[in-house]
Image: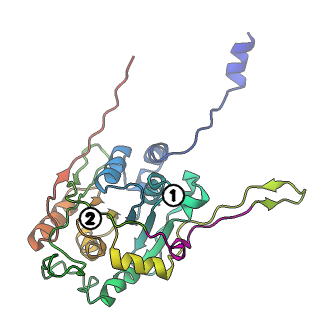
Amino acid sequence: YKLKKQKKYAPKVLLRRPSSRSICETYFKKYPARIGFMRVDALSLLLSMANVGAYSDVLAVDMVGGLVVGSVAERLGGTGYVCSTYLGSAPSSIDIIRMYNLSSDMTSRIFQAPLGDLCSLQSAGDAPSVLSGSIQRDLVEPAAVPDESLQSSLAKPINTEVSDGNAQSMTVQPINMEVPEPATDDHLNQGDISMSDCKGSNGNSIAPKAPRAGKAPSPERMKYWGEHGFSSLIVAAPDHEVESVVADLLPLLSYSAPFAIYHQYLQPLATCMHSLQASKMAIGLQITEPWLREYQVS
């Protein structure tokens, strides 16, 4: 009798640590439009095709509330850096990162910088202009001009999905992926914040407030990215034209760096794929359609 009443009037709640899977599934069920109708299988495919791993410098265009940036930071585990860039002067919202409950070290490695500032680093190095919106660029040989930011031998993956299960994505496996070793200089790690315990009004120690994610990167870090480039790129901007955004972002990557692009529909990816193939800015492009079905196992 007691167990029956306890089950009815005293339910038990199990608290679990948030993860990319649980957060993505929750938003997909309650607020799918806020995350661009991205399922958890499409999110995992994005991270896999972009080759996100330890000590990576990931460039992300996250316009799905911060779901992509938070997932990248979670996978990096406080070892690499993720830079969320945005178009225009107002940064895009990445409030979903607060749901991840990341540590201070992981949060301090999340930066936000406008696309114009990142492209200015390439312009300073006599690189072709990337703000013109055109993808027609002169092809150069990497062996002859090693400092050029634009090459014709970049291997990139592109990825997309729709909400009703008929999702499309453009992917490609990276070729001869060479990730530059992370800088070990102390001045490059200015984003790492060490906070001491605070004292409350009663004298007891309280946990320090975690630093806010999305601060501006230091000039040293920006210079490092301008010289070595980003190791991978993830684009999730359903409300923007994929073709023009990708054309501006590709010169910011390092040699043979993979990239993945998510979109809710197929046609924008098909147009972007055709433009990249015609301009020979990327190789090994393909469109992949992620598909998910839940099975009940007895």
Tell me the kind of residue under disc 2. Answer: Ala
**Does 34 sit above or below residue 143?**
above
> Which mark identifies residue 15?
none
Q: Relative to 83, is 242 on the left or the right?
A: left
Distance from Cα at disc 2 to Cα at disc 1:
21 Å
In this figure, which colouring scheme has been used for the structure? rainbow
* Quarter-of-image position of residue 273: bottom left
Q: Is residue 238 visible?
A: no
Question: Percent position (x, y) of residue 30?
Answer: 48, 46
Q: Relative to 126, is 84 on the left or the right?
A: right
Callout 1 crowding tier (Cα within 10 Å): few <14, some 14–19, many ≥20: many
**Camera-nearest residue between 246 and 221:** 221
The N terminus sits in image quarter: top right
**Does 195 sit above or below residue 120?**
above
> Which mark identifies residue 78?
1
Q: Relative to 140, is 60 on the left or the right?
A: right
Q: What stretch is highlighted in magenta?
A: 183-196
Q: Relative to 174, is 138 on the left or the right?
A: left
Tell me the kind of residue under disc 1. Answer: Gly
Which residue does the image show at 58% across and 67% down from the upper left? Answer: 192
Q: Is mark 2 on a helix, strand or loop?
A: loop
Residue 184 on the magenta segment:
yes
* Quarter-of-image position of residue 170: bottom left
The C terminus sits in image quarter: top left
Secondary structure of the magenta portion, mostly? Answer: loop
Residue beneath disc 2: 257
